[in-house]
Amino acid sequence: MIVQMSFVTLAGPKSDIDRVIDTYLSKYEIQLENALVELNSSGNLLPYVEANPYKDILDKSHALLELMDESIANSPLTDMSVEEATNVINNIDDQIKDLKEEINTLNIRKDKLNEDYDCISPFKNLEYDLKQVLGMNYIKYRFGRVPRDMWDSFQTFINPDLDAVFIDCLVDNDFIWGVYFAPEISIKKVDESFEALHFEQVKIPDNYSGTPAQACMNIAKSISEIDEKIRTVESRISTLVQVNKSHVLSACNRIEIAYGNFDVRKLAACTRDSNIVFHILCGWMATKDALSLQAETENDPNVVCMIDNKTDESKVPPTKLKNPKFAKPFEMYVKMYGLPKYGEFDPTIFVAITYSLLFGAMFGDLGQGLCIFAIGLIVYLIKKIPLAAILSAAGFTSAIFGLLYGSVFGFEGVIPQIWVNPRTSKMNLPIVGSFNTVFVAAILFGVFLILITMIINMVNAFKNKKYADLLIGPNGLTGLIFYASLMAVVILYMSGHSLPGTIVLVIMFVIPLILIALKAPIVNLVQKNKKLFPESAAMYFVEGFFELFEMLLNYFSNTLSFLRVGAFAISHGAMMEVVLTLAGATDGGSPNILVLILGNIFVCGMEGLVVAIQGLRLEYYELFGRFYSGSGKEFKPYSKNIKH
């Protein structure tokens, strides 16, 4: 059902807005509306412009929450003021900031060591002490690399006539790494020659001793020590947060509430009366909550609470659904089509009942139904997934229809057949001859549902004061009389009973069709409009003829569409017969248990999916289209953003 809504306006001194939000609005679900837009008839309203002062502290609180583990969900919360919460967060944040600065310093040292390691490591095979090499006075050195594709030319170039010695240290996919030595007096010429061969110099840090291999080992050890120090500091941060997690979580929660409360100002307006500036807040609430809020603020001298229950086309309340527990999961299907408009019939319970019955009739099997019921129920209890609850309800009705059909995991005859066997039970009908009983039952059930939806449409029209649609139309009173009469005549004929007389048939069929065809002129005549027809009379009757033909075609197709219910009931039995045949369970021998299990799983999965889709199709196309617009706006309470 749709909860009755009221439009609530709260007003009071501007300086008192935080108290009003904390004391009153935080207790109730209210969809706040922009006061400037909703109360635009008042010319002296001004926007409530003020920056949120809790933005910085909120960012700090979120950063602290990211440092906590998943166990914070079970941490108890304590009440504290905004000032206390701010002090808690700032205090912890300052301590963590110092520790993070320490980590940052360690990371800078670590990055420098990694750079040094990358510079020295290609020369590990050099068997000379770095201090001695870097400290030579008369012999100059150059560490570097040569592209591999230049190596042949490089080797040719290095000959005894050149005043240089090149020692290669490492060969990788792209470069030859090494070092060359040359006398001080020749170094300039040697450098020019090596540069011509694309030799790239590498600067070696001068603060390491020993061979390059020993230097790399010392660097790696230093890096490992720094990593350990970083882990120690990170552990101190984690310990600090975990020890204070209850206080931190409570403080973060309070700051988030304060931030959300302050953001209410974006939707508020201000107005001046004498020397006092007042705030104005407005929005939609459940009427029950609105009356409670009004009673609560009645003795508060600084709060005025007004309730308006009037609605019109320009002021349509949002839709808030409230349904019994068994039907609530089916709200998912309703929302997929669109929420009901405020004042419209909420089809959730109708969908819960009809969808479960349609699924059960198409899938009827006691064993498979109970399995689906159990799986859906377990998943729903653990995960609270609405689709799992829908699956559980569908499995329950499938089990009931399985009892009626006498089917357990595809076996027939294990339990007594209470009603019919979908594949074998038949009945004789005039003209048609032998016809499956489930087809007849499916069509009759479809006719019943279509008549129910017509009645629902009439109720909707009455509630919304659309009396023309209530009385005249394919889904109004005239359509109901015509369709019900047509089905009654068909049932009488098929069951061998005599048909009504000509006068009764004219009243049942001709008069409703004439009224439907002449709806527009009749409405204009009642409203005393000078123009009876929207366009020319000839064009109106031509269009009316085709609209009547389309209406009759819709009645026919919608009714026959329910044949799929019987068709899938037969299909399910046929598929299970194939499984039993493959398992060798039809010739009296010992069946293959593995084939039986896999076959049942396959049929449950494949046919269950198909039947679920077909049931939803019947709901949307054959039923919803007759009474449901789905144009409602969802109720979005602001309290969900400020209460945690």
Image (spheres, rainbow, N blue to C red):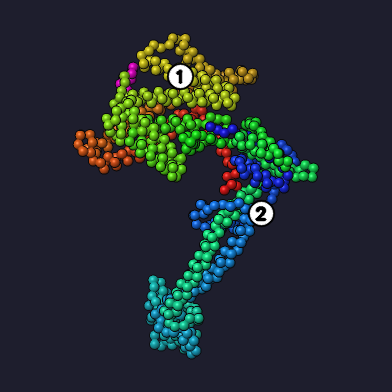
Residue 484, numbered label: 1
Which SS class for mark 1?
Answer: helix
Q: Tag 1: residue type?
A: Ala
Q: Is residue 108 above or below residue 522?
A: below
x, y (%) of residue 133? 46, 85
Give the x, y percent position of residue 209: 46, 83
Q: Nearer the viewer, residue 78 or 44?
A: 78
Nearest the camera: 361 or 402? Answer: 402
According to the image, label 2 marks what residue? 53
Label 2 with label 1: CB-CB less than 8 Å: no
Q: Is residue 433 magenta?
A: yes
Task: Give residue 468's position: percent from left, percent from top.
Answer: 57, 22
Residue 223 lies left or right of residue 19; in this view the side is left
x and y percentages locating residue 414 in the rendered image: 27, 31
Q: Residue at x 41, y 43 (%)?
A: 379
Query: Which amino acid lies under the numbered mark 2 shown in the image of this protein?
Result: Pro
Q: Is residue 550 above or below residue 250?
A: above
- Looking at the image, tell me whether mark 2 or mark 1 is earlier in sequence order: 2
Q: Is residue 55 visible?
A: no
**Magenta region, residue range:** 429-435
Q: Is residue 141 left or right of residue 171?
A: right
Callout 2: SS: loop
Q: Can residue 103 be seen by looking at this rendering?
A: yes
